[in-house]
Amino acid sequence: MPSEPRKESWDMLMLVLILYSMWMVPLRICFDEEATGCWLAFEILISIAFMLDVVITFNTVVYEATTGTWVLSRRQIAQRYLGGWFWIDAPASVPVELIDITIDRLSNSGDTGSLGALRMLRLFRLFRLLRLLKLGDYIEVLESAADMNLKFLKILLMKFQLIAIAHLLGCFWFSMYVLNSADPALTTWAETYDEGRAVKEGTSTSLKYMYSIYWAAITLTTVGYGDVVPVNDSERMYTIGAMLCAALVFGYMASGIGQVVGSMDRTRALADEKTSQIKEYLAWRNLPMKNSTFQMEVFALIRNVSYVKGEVVFKRGEPSRAIMFLSSGEVVVYSPASVSPLARITPDTEITLMHGNADMEVMRFKHEGCLAQIPHKSRARLVHMHGTDCDTRDL
């Protein structure tokens, strides 16, 4: 089952491995830094884990939202998987590290006949980045498993997305130098920036990465200092694409931050929105200012509280006098002298809460099943029922 603790723990492991792959795959490819020693063993284990995840997915039941049932048939599970995520998971599970070991052995033995094809298979490492498309599913598991503030998590995710995009753009920006360096007639950005320090003998990968991520950061943030610039056509084309991406990212981040800030007080935001709608309606009806002011004062007193099945709304003899708004659901009236209900109140039923007497006037009116009873020479209390909600306030 997807909700079992073991499956959730496995999903969390997959999340960590996907994030590791997202970080290391571009570095391995663009900076030509192959894993060795313990890191090579670890990345082989990652490939095995991705292959094992494919097998586990073939054996995990699927929830069918349209019917509200779980799909238990292995045949149906396989059909659903083969019709979707399998074509992303399968290429991402190719054990590229084992291919690298094979290439090294063939190179040492002098057998170069199959080296070209094997080197092409190295590009399957890029397919691991496609697993980023499943990141949202794993984050949902994280949200349900961890007691985290969702607003804080959204801000954290936006920061992570910005860093991830800058990382990818920076790595592939350096790859533009690697691709163009094969042509001696072409000048590249790495040869012109900082006196070509990035391409000098003995320059560390960390320095190359810093130059690349610096360009990506100033491009994404639309600062553009102008010190790292494209100097050939292929670099200019890549920069155009990066700037278009930066424009989309900037707009997405601005919108996302606005939504998070706006949802900090969601209840207040909804109340303000409703207030604006009522003001517009009152202006359209062209009511006198005195009536409009009174309507807004009454609206400010309305609150919502849920009633569950079997809960008593009020009892006979209670001093509360109220206006009831019942827009959906049903209220049943009982008498102590009878076990059978006296009446069933629905949204289109006009009801009387209490009978009047010499000291009380009874006002009856109907609005979506509402009846008011206001005592003479005394203050009244208001009850608002919206759907299955109810609350009382003094007027």
Image (cartoon, grey):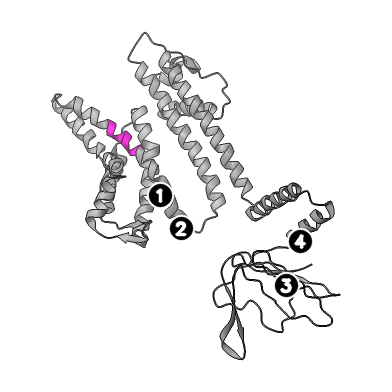
Residue annotated with mark 3: 322
Tags 1 and 3 touching, CB below 8 Å: no
Q: In the drawing, does residue 265 fall left or right of residue 170?
A: right
The label shown at residue 314 is: none
Whole-Å distance between the Cαs marked 2 and 4? 40 Å
Extreme-bottom residue of the structure: 337
Question: In this picture, is 365 found above or below 124?
Answer: below
Q: Residue at x 46, y 37 (%)?
A: 164
**Residue 128 falls inside the magenta stretch:** yes
Q: In the drawing, does residue 350 fall left or right of residue 202?
A: right
Q: Amino acid at mark 3?
A: Ala
Which residue is at the front of the view, 73 or 103?
A: 73
Q: Residue at x 64, y 56 (%)?
A: 267
Residue annotated with mark 2: 144
**Residue 151 falls inside the magenta stretch:** no
Residues in magenta?
A: 123-129
Q: Which corner quadrant holds the C terminus?
A: bottom right
Tags 4 and 3 touching, CB below 8 Å: no
Label 4 crowd bin: few (<14), some (14–19), many (20+), radius 10 Å? some
Secondary structure type for disc 2: helix
Where is residue 314 shown, x and y percent of the image? Answer: 66, 78
Tell me if residue 255 can be seen.
yes
Label 1 crowd bin: few (<14), some (14–19), many (20+), radius 10 Å? few
